[in-house]
Amino acid sequence: MSRKLPIPLILLVAILFIALGDSFLPQPLSGASLSTRTALNSAIAGIFPSWRPKTKPYERTEKALEQEQSAP
């Protein structure tokens, strides 16, 4: 009869490996932890494109200030 590891324990070990592995583990594993974290960071950052507004949100306010300053 085979015994299965609980999924939360596996996730906890994986998170600890990624988060703290380069600080506490010996060299081959610390390098793997660092490269894994770097790859995950770039993958997560690649999911979200850089957001740039299509309009100028302060344009109306700037025009109103210019009109107030130029009015006698």
Image (spheres, rainbow, N blue to C red):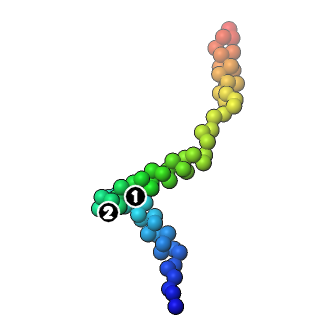
Outermost residue toward the left?
26
Viewer-nearest residue: 65 or 33: 33
Q: Is residue 35 above or below residue 55?
A: below
Viewer-nearest residue: 53 or 22: 22
Q: Is residue 54 above or below residue 72?
A: below
* Residue drawn where x is 67% and y is 24% of the image: 59
- Asked whether, in this view, residue 21 is left or right of residue 55, the answer is left
Q: Secondary structure at mark 2?
A: loop
- Asked whether, in this view, residue 8 is left or right of residue 72, the answer is left
Mark linked to residue 33: 1
Quadrant (top left, top right, bottom left, bottom right) of the C terminus: top right
Amino acid under disc 1: Ser
Mark linked to residue 19: none
* Residue drawn where x is 68% and y is 19% of the image: 63
Percent of width and height locating residue 61: 67, 25
Outermost residue toward the bottom?
1
- Give the class, few, some or many, for how many residues have Cα within 10 Å of label 1's Cα (few <14, many ≥20): many
First in sequence: mark 2 or mark 1? 2
Q: Is residue 17 above or below residue 50?
A: below
Amino acid under disc 2: Leu
Mark linked to residue 25: 2
Do we see residue 49 in this rendering? yes
Percent of width and height locating residue 54: 69, 31
